[in-house]
Image (spheres, rainbow, N blue to C red):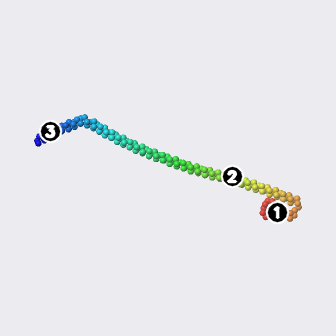
C-alpha cells in the first residue's frame, strides 16, 4: 500500500510539474494574445460606449437646437400673423373712413343739386307768376272791368297757378 501512495505522490508531482509547465507555456505563448484580444475588445467596447455617449450628446444638442429653432419659427409666425391682423384692421379702418368720406361727399352733392333744382323751380314759378300777373293786368286794362269780371279773372289766375281754394 505504501508503494501506491508514493506512486501517487510521484504522479501528483509529475502532474503538478506538467500543469506548471503547461501554465508557463500558456502564460508565455497563449495568454498574451488572449489578454491582448481581451484588452482590444475592452477598448472597442469602451470606444463604442464613448462614441454612443458622444452621439447621444450630439443628439441632445441637436434636439435643443431644433427646439430653439422651432420656438423662433413660432415666434416669427406669431409676429407675422399679428402684423397681418393689424394691417387688415388698418386697411378695414381706412376703407371705412374712405367710404364715409365718399358717402358724405355724395350726400353733399345731392343736397346741393336738390337746392339748385329747388331754386330753379322757384325761379320758374316766380316767372310764371309775373307773366300771369302781367297778363291779368293787361286784360284788366283792356276791358273795363266790373266786379264780376274781376272775380272771374282772379279765379282764373288762382286756377292757373294751382292754389287750392
Q: Nearer the viewer, residue 52 or 70?
A: 52
Residue 132 in the image: state x and y as whole percent. 82, 58
Q: Nearer the viewer, mark 2 or mark 3?
A: 3
Q: Between marks 1 and 2, how big is the CA–CA gap?
A: 41 Å
Viewer-proximal residue, 2 or 105? Answer: 2
Q: Quadrant of the C terminus?
A: bottom right
Q: Which residue is denoted by mark 1 in the rendering? A: 155
For label 2, the SS is helix
Q: In this rendering, would 47 be left or right of 95?
A: left
Residue 123 lies in quadrant = bottom right
Q: Nearer the viewer, residue 137 or 83?
A: 83
Q: Earlier in the sequence, mark 2 or mark 3?
A: 3
Report the residue marked by disc 3: 10
Which one is earlier in the sequence, the residue at label 3 or at label 1? 3
Q: How far across and how far down the image is residue 136, in percent?
A: 84, 59
Q: Residue at (82%, 60%) from the top-left corner?
A: 157
Horizontal and vertical percent position of residue 133: 82, 58
Q: Residue at x 44, y 46 (%)?
A: 67
Give the residue drawn at x 35%, y 40%.
Answer: 48
User: What's the CA distance linking mark 2 and mark 3?
Assistant: 140 Å
Label 2: which residue? 109
Query: Closer to us: mark 3 or mark 1?
Result: 3
Q: Is residue 117 left or right of residue 14?
A: right
Between residues 29 and 134, which one lies in front from this camera angle? 29
Residue 78: assigned label: none
Is residue 147 placed above or below 3 in the rendered structure?
below
Image location of residue 57, percent across then percent down:
38, 43
Name the quadrant of the N terminus: top left
Amino acid at each position: 500500500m505504501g508503494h501506491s501512495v508514493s506512486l501517487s505522490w510521484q504522479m501528483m508531482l509529475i502532474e503538478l510539474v506538467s500543469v506548471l509547465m503547461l501554465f508557463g507555456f500558456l502564460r508565455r505563448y497563449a495568454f498574451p494574445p488572449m489578454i491582448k484580444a481581451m484588452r482590444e475588445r475592452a477598448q472597442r467596447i469602451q470606444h463604442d460606449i464613448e462614441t454612443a455617449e458622444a452621439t447621444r450628446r450630439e443628439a441632445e444638442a441637436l434636439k435643443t437646437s431644433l427646439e430653439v429653432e422651432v420656438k423662433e419659427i413660432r415666434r416669427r409666425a406669431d409676429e407675422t400673423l399679428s402684423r397681418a391682423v393689424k394691417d387688415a384692421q388698418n386697411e378695414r379702418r381706412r376703407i371705412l373712413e374712405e367710404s364715409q368720406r365718399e358717402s358724405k361727399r355724395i350726400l353733399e352733392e345731392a343736397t346741393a343739386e336738390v337746392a339748385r333744382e329747388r331754386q330753379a323751380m322757384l325761379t320758374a314759378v316766380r316767372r310764371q307768376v309775373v307773366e300771369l300777373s302781367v297778363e291779368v293786368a293787361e286784360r284788366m286794362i283792356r276791358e273795363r272791368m266790373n266786379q264780376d269780371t274781376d272775380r272771374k279773372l282772379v279765379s282764373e289766375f288762382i286756377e292757373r297757378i294751382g292754389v287750392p281754394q
